[in-house]
Image (tube, rainbow, N blue to C red):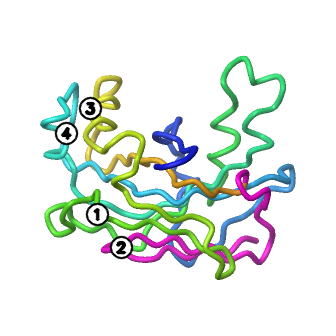
Amino acid sequence: MSGPARAARSSSPAASAMCGTGDDVNLVPESRQTDWEAELTVVIGTPASNVSREQALQHVAGYTVANDISARDLQFPKEHRPLGGDWWRSKNRPTFLPMGPYIVPADLLGDYRELEITLDLNGQRMQHDWAANMLFDVPTLISQASAITTLLPGDVILTGSPAGNGGHWQRWLAPGDLMEVSISGIGTLRNTCR
């Protein structure tokens, strides 16, 4: 996306990290800098191994919404910086990956690049952009991921987040915060922090 953004989730999400719309996001007491990342998410429909960019979209079942919660102060502790950070510890806490509310089939959604992505925190717009502005497009992400591992039906790829996460605003999540991530054509993912 425009501005500083990640290309894709850097570690595989643990099943326990996932939750749905309406579920609480449980903040962890050891983090004081937990933030959000609105992301368009690709759901794989057929096995994909070493696929080309041109073949990549044939393996997409559909798209959904995700909020990639990250405990930033746990992600880059001094002792882990030489290793590129501790992505597992910062992103895979229970409830740190809300997803939903629906998976919309790719053939019903149209061109994913035309999707508008927003995140509102307690009603205030914090992130806003279009999928067309992603640093890496969906075919590239699928092709690159499938060159490393075989993607299986149900696997998800988070595609990157617009500028405007907590680090940008120096505003961190607190108990009671309501996050609403919306992607046009898919729906709105709502979660409250506890």
Q: Verify CB contact (< 8 Å) between mark 3 and mark 4.
A: yes
Residue marked by disc 2 = 184
Name the amino acid type tagged 2.
Answer: Ser
Of the two numbered discs 3 and 2 on the same chain, state the one appearing first in sequence: 3
N-terminal-most mark, 2 or 4: 4
User: Residue type at mark 4?
Assistant: Ala
Q: Which residue is mark 1?
A: 114
Comparing labels 1 and 4, the label whose residue is closer to the camera: 1
Q: Are marks 3 and 2 in contact (CB under 8 Å)?
A: no
Left or right of 114? Residue 82 is: right
Q: Which residue is mark 4?
A: 56
Q: Residues under labels 2 and 4: Cα distance?
A: 22 Å
Image-quadrant location for residue 62: bottom left
- Whether residue 182 is in magenta: the answer is yes
Looking at the rendering, the stretch of residues picked out in magenta corresponds to: 167-194
**Which of label 2 and label 4 is nearer to you?**
2
Marks 2/1 in contact by CB < 8 Å: the verdict is yes
First of labels 2, 1 by sequence position = 1
Labels 3 and 4: the sequence-earlier one: 4
Q: Nearer the viewer, mark 1 or mark 3?
A: 1
Give the amino acid type for the residue marked by disc 3 in the picture: Ser
Q: Nearer the viewer, residue 183 or 175?
A: 183
For label 3, the crowd category at 10 Å Cα-Cα, with few meaning under 14, some 14 to 19 and many 20 or more, is many
Q: Do the residues bearing badges 1 and 3 touch, measured as CB atoms within 8 Å? A: no
Number of callouts: 4
